[in-house]
Amino acid sequence: MSAVTEETQDAHGRDTLGSLARDYVAKLRGGDVGSMPAVLGLVVLVIAFSVLRPETFTKAFNFGNLIQQSAGVTIIAMGLVFVLLLGEIDLSAGYTAGTAAAVTSVLLTSHDWPVAAAILVGLLTGTVIGFFIGNMVARLGIPSFVVTLALFLALQGVMLTIIGEKGSIDSGEFIAKLNSDNLPVWLGWVVAVALVATYAALTFVSNRRRRRHGLTSEPNLLWALKSGGLAVLTFLVVYYLSIERSPKPNIKSITGVPISLVIIIGLAIVLTVVLSRTRWGSHVYAVGGNAEAARRAGINVKLVRLSCFMVCSTVAAVGGLMLASYSGGVNNVTGGNQTLLYAVGAAVIGGTSLFGGKGRIVDAIIGGTVVATIANGMGLMNQPDSRKYIVTGLVLLVAASVDAISRRRAAATGRV
């Protein structure tokens, strides 16, 4: 009896795995490619730069440096996903990051505030900016492009006023460590094991609960493959970052997982849960997909829009702290120059749609890695900034084209 039951379950698992594979292929044919082009592009970039600059690009030192270089832009891109899901845009996110970092730095270095209080005020600065933008867009109906363009200009002045005549301000010892320091090697392994174990346990329990209620769920084989794949990838990254990667280890040793990577992963987990596991998250996707249909379904569309801009600006404030940490302080270009463009590009390149209704937090991470890899690899090849911008722009154009074509194919097949 037991053998028959197990045999039936195995067969069901195979059928389910096969049906999932067929569904995925159907999604691809229907235009829903997700982040697959970005992942494939990242693989191509890594292989290309590894062949062209094997003596530098593949080194552990460069790997750790690439993570720290991309941290600020990647986190800002994670916040932008929320407004892009609505089909909106926030052109002020970069200078929101800079302004929040300036507020935090001034409180820490000029007024000797406690670290926690200064960071909290910095984050609240981002929240207030998002609240203002959200009200202008949701309540008054002003296009987000116009509102955030105005804030893009105004916040530059605010940030410069906070910084003062010197043109820069030190970020303080604690902030400086956020994107320059590393975890002890043993703690990096503890975090890695905890991350993999938590993912495996939560997804297993979720699958069992769904089966118990007669809902569709992942087969055990797929769960095992996902958990195993995550474990292999995580442990390889931690191992590579745990070896000595300092060019001059006799002067300064560099080992361990960068703190910035832990912050990115932790924030990504929280934001992903919010988007995928809460009623508010489903409302965000509903409003982005069809605002009028969402309104008729009883969703407070204005409140969703307002809250998304608040989340975007608050997350951008976190990104600002990472930018200030990496540069050692806040200056007149913190959050400026190409920061915003790279952040928007990262989200779109990763697979978040400019038309709304489609996107994930992981898209920002993948896209941020692509953008950082282009800049890092071409820098190692001693290519001028002009070529970096051209290549990054072309990649963004390709990503936007894929998004538009995918949307058209999805509409043709009745998926949107």
Image (cartoon, rainbow, N blue to C red):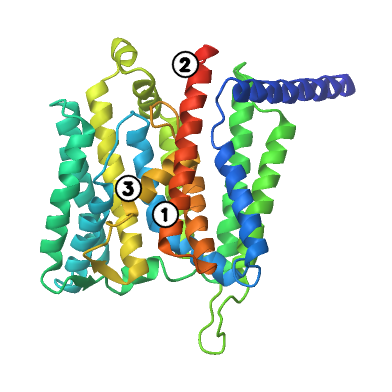
Mark 2 residue element: loop
Classed neighbour count for the residue bearing mark 2: other residues with Cα under 10 Å, few (<14), some (14–19), many (≥20) = few
For badge 1, the amino acid type reads: Tyr
Instruction: Give me the residue at 20% from left, 47% from top.
Output: 152
Q: Residue at x 66, y 56 (%)?
A: 47
Along the line of sight, which residue is nearer the eye, 320 or 393? 393
Q: Amino acid at mark 2?
A: Val
The CA span between labels 1 and 3 is 25 Å
* Alpha carbon separation for disc pair 1 and 2: 34 Å
Q: Label 2: which residue?
A: 416
- Give how far across and how far down residue 170 sits, in percent: 24, 73
Whole-percent x, y for residue 278 in the image: 41, 29
Mark 1 = which residue?
A: 389
Q: Is residue 160 left or right of residue 336?
A: left
Q: Badge 3 local density, few (<14 within 10 Å), some, or many (20+)?
A: many
Q: Quadrant of the N terminus?
A: top right
Query: Mark 3 sits on what residue?
Result: 315
Camera sees residue 205 = yes
Q: Nearer the viewer, residue 173 or 31?
A: 31
Give the CA separation, mark 2 to mark 3.
29 Å
- In the picture, the disc for residue 33 is none
Between disc 1 and disc 2, the foreground one is 1
Indicate the secondary structure of the residue bearing disc 1: helix
Query: Which of the 4 image quadrants contains residue 32?
Result: top right
Query: What x and y, as percent, mark residue 266?
Result: 45, 51
